[in-house]
Image (cartoon, rainbow, N blue to C red):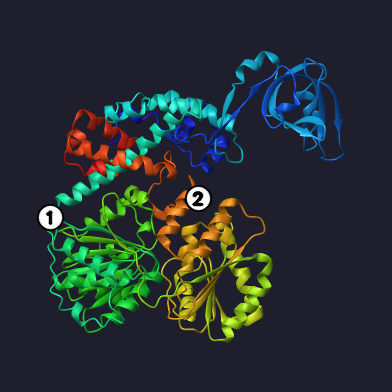
Amino acid sequence: MRPDLLNPLFAEVTVLKGVGPAMAKPLERLKLSRVVDVAFHLPTGWIDRCPRDELDMADAGRVIAIQLTAVDYKSSAGRGPTRAHAVDAKGNYVSLVYFGGHSGWVKKLLPLGEPRFVSGKLELYGQELQIVHPDIVVPPEEASTVGGREAIYPQAEGINSKRLAAFAAQAIERAPDLPEWIEPSLKAKHGWPGWREALANIHADPADEKARARLAYDEVFANQLALLLVRGEARSKRGRTLVGDGRLRDRLDLPYSPTGAQSRSIGEIEGDMAQNRPMLRLLQGDVGSGKTLVATMALLIAVEGGAQGALLAPTEILARQHYETLSRTLTGIATVAILTGRDKGRVRESTLMGLADGSIDILIGTHAIFQDSVTYKALGLVVVDEQHRFGVAQRMLLQAKAAVPPHLLVMTATPIPRTLTLAQYGEMDVSRLDEMPPGRQPIETRVLSEERLAEVVEALGRHLEGGGQAYWVCPLVEESETSDMAAAEMRAETLRRRFGDAAVALVHGRMKPLEKDAEMARFSEARAGVLVATTVIEVGVDVPNATLIVIEHADRFGLAQLHQLRGRVGRGGGKSVCLLLRGGTLSETSRARLALMRESNDGFRIAEEDLRLRGSGELLGTRQSGEMTFRLAAPEMLGELLPPANSDARLLVDRDGGLSGERGQAARVALYLFERDAAVGLLRSG
């Protein structure tokens, strides 16, 4: 139960004065549905208003605050600008410019001959001074209400920074004084204020670094403590000791010897599974580094040890692909079955019976494999593929599925910077596949302007004539599947006109699973030469004959996503090419991203660089994770804050009595405040 102390913060946002149904809509767009969301919606910048008695050309480019008097107006026809010419106390002229053709409103706002206190950005227009759309125009007696520094918040249509600041002030008023959870010597060392004081300070002065660091630290600390508690709980359970004797693995017919990184990872997994506490291991490997082989070995160790294994995939396409691969690889070695939401009737019944009586060794599927109706005779290992789609809560759920908690191996092809591994998987041990199997050639990456689209289509034609296959990825147009779908359908249509209907397959997120599978099958069986897709193909589609990928609007994608998409090619023996089509105008960040993609195939380097380039932007597809990302701690702060937060959380658990001591009670409040309280439910001590 959340402590009563926090109830005022977790009330609906409509309790704030001024938030009615109309205002709730723009707040909802900003994902601010509760008071706590408003309190944690921190300003990202500020405006310093320079108070001035007279106008000065040297102030051009600055935001000034000054008393002015309108002396005449000049309106343009239609929706052209209205200019109010005004003078300061010394008679210096400035034009106050308003666009949109509202001359009547401007005249009301700035009556002739009446002084007004005005603030906005002073600019030079030729040899004249002007202020376009002053953001403050008030009578002189209200000048004292205009502060020197004003916070700028992330905004949405229908709400501006001023309103957000007013709501934040109310949210802070409702915020209680909370007991201190930071270790006293750490707080003193950094000179951090208390929690409530830090919250008030950052909204009053967004440049207050100490307040910002304190709030970010609190969030990171709650995250680390939650992960430690989850890990402690998992470690305290007795698991099943699974020792493989090698009899099944020896029968595998491998095309090449495992790389050093694969052998090392298999050894680490084998060591974990031989313990009597459940394994919790993350396997990180770049696209094509051979994670599937490591997972197969782990599943065989479980079967050799007398248990069953389950492999959980995030999508039906990927589950079926794993099933095809493993059934082929393990023919005559182990019994493999599949279960997805689509399997019904007799097929499903027979799979459920096989799991219950133990005749099925390895089950592959989507979330359906953890439904209540599914019982295992002896589930010993769960392998989760594409971990970033499963949060800590789901990991805990999996472990509750068997009488004895199974060993857990999670795999991700999204290379994660070392800093973030600790933030997202602090409760896990980590194995890294940091070398490529022999025979994998680096993918040649070229960046082309979209103006050369016709040339690209011609090159695609030559590629198809030579018997090759290709992916064509359409951009995320905006946060809407509909527009993604429209972009993909239009591109498929233009390519069909050029190459014929049969040559082009199309896959997007709004298709029914059966349609999607049918189109994928046409492509993987080489009945179609081009697969036009939205980013649904980011994970796991495997067609070795596809050696060309075209990514439209590549400048709109993050680095990690581009790297994932590029990994769809280069899976056979031949040389593969990735063409990144960019728009006409590029930001510095986009330029740097595309340059890095051109020069590097190393996912771990790309991930570290992505973290640096994005700053506080969204990171590595964690948006899909179902895992709460950090709201107060920007990614560039994590490197500095994670190690002390991790040590402080360990100190609390090991020395200060966990959640039952005095500091522990305060830390429990922090877990609820930052909504990491799934961990609290685990604790016997509380």
Label 2, label 1: how far apart the Cα atoms are: 43 Å
Q: Badge 1 is on which residue?
A: 238
Q: For mark 1, does the 10 Å Cα neighbourhood hold few (<14), some (14 to 19), or many (20 or more) residues? A: some
Q: Would you say 128 lies left or right of 634 here? A: right
Taking depth in this image into account, of 410 and 348 the one nearest to the observer is: 410
Disc 1 marks a residue whose amino acid type is Arg
Q: Secondary structure at mark 2?
A: helix
In the rendered image, is residue 259 in sight?
Answer: yes
Q: Give the residue drawn at x 60%, y 78%.
A: 460
Q: Badge 2 is on which residue?
A: 613
Q: Secondary structure at mark 1?
A: loop
Q: For mark 2, does the 10 Å Cα neighbourhood hold few (<14), some (14 to 19), or many (20 or more) residues? A: some
Disc 2 marks a residue whose amino acid type is Leu
Q: Give the residue drawn at x 30%, y 43%.
A: 224
Please provide percent x and percent y for residue 399.
Answer: 22, 56
> Quarter holding the C terminus?
top left
Query: Height in image: 329 above or below 582?
Result: below
Taking depth in this image into account, of 322 and 206 the one nearest to the observer is: 206
